[in-house]
Amino acid sequence: MFPSIRRGIRTLCSRRIYFFMIVVVPLGCTFFFLNLMNEGLPLKVPVGIVDMDHSSLSRRITRSLDATELIDIADDLESYNAAMTKVRGGELFGFFYIPSDFQEKALSGRTPTLSFYSNMSIFVPGTLSFKGFKTIAVTTSGGIVETSLTSSGLDEDIAESLIMPLVTDNHPIGNPWTNYNIYLSQSFLAGLIALLVMTVTSFSICQEIKNRTSPEWLSTARGSMGLALIGKLLPQSIVFISIGVAIQTVMFKFMHFPLNCNPWHMILAMMLLVLSCQAFATVVVELVPNLRLSMSICSLVGILCFSVAGFSFPVDKMYGAIGIFAYIMPIRYYFLIYVDQALNGLPLYYSRLYYIAMLVMMLTPVLGLRRLRRHCLTPVYVP
């Protein structure tokens, strides 16, 4: 094994692409995502206001809109068409429309209509503008109804109870700050590591077959395919795990992400994530021992991790034929461990199946060692 490990270290140090993919890309993306989401939630989305009424009530609505933390009145527009043109051009993410005679109709009880438009093709700012608009619209509607009731002689307390008979008290679990950074950065960076591990693993193995150095690689391990793989992948595993733990340290210690468990639980999850992703890529190479095809498959699976593994959409709500793929991706189990352990602080017993699933994935390459050894002994590169 030791000659194989020495050869693996020499290979790792021989090309700058390894250093770039294993060290530079993960750390660079970590800085980018954590800096991008540093405030936790994008605030002050630029929107417009179309005030066709120019009354004291419409000006009060405009001030209320501008005072919310989610949106920023960046432009006061003269017409619906001008506002829609700016939304379509990407200058604004939505606009709030106050019709003419709004105050007169509101005070006379003729139910005027408030309209707001959000650009949902860009999901996050569109959703935030929609939320800000709807909050002000509902508040304005309730205020007008309350004014009408009190002006008709109804007691103010009774009017308030009629408008809002129930008051909700929300307590978000795991992420009480509703901080996007805690959720998105953790899932994106873990998915990025999984993508890099799979592509680097498939590249390093298939590179031997492409360059016809695989017989020499096998002879270094005295003909043992298992020892050859361990010698090649172990140095990569150590570097990837070190980088992954460093990223976890930045998030949990310096960025103060919730960590409601023993830190070793998440460190173990990172170790298993790296090793199981290497095993997944090895299985792909065993089935398709071609540099171009195996890297394409690993890249495709790595990209699908961000959508199919359940980060942003629940697996049980996906189509069955799509959702089943989530359970063959190691990143899915890492994400479940993160939710159970770091966010919810459950006892380790309740996450045992996720750790076991990644351990089982680490053993799957054993099934195709003989096939990979045959291809390594008689390397044939197909471009």
Image (cartoon, rainbow, N blue to C red):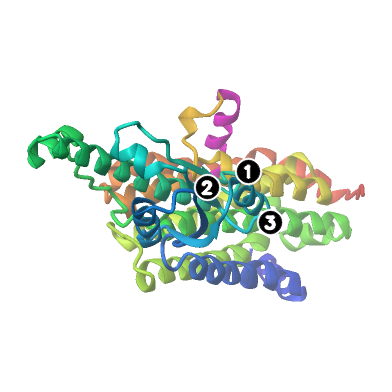
Q: Residue 75 placed where, x, y %?
A: 54, 61
Which residue is pictured at 49% across the width and 67% down the height? 34
Which residue is pictured at 57% across the width and 39% down the height? 308
* Front residue of 171 and 164: 164
Q: Where residue 331 is drawn, which disc sits there?
A: 2
Instruction: Mark 2: give few (<14), some (14-19) or many (20+) Cα within 10 Å.
Output: many
Report the residue that reaches farthest toward the top: 320
Mark in front: 1 vs 2: 1
Vertical side of 272 occupied by 371: above or below: above
Q: What is the distance, in whole Å, between disc 1 and disc 3 at their CAs?
A: 18 Å
Vertical side of 214 occupied by 363: above or below: above
Q: Where residue 205 is drawn, which disc sits there?
A: none
Kindly identify which residue carries mark 1: 304
The reply to whether the C-beta atoms of the residues labelled 1 and 2 are less than 8 Å apart is: no
Q: Give the residue type at disc 3.
A: Thr
Q: What is the distance, in whole Å, between disc 1 and disc 2 at their CAs?
A: 11 Å
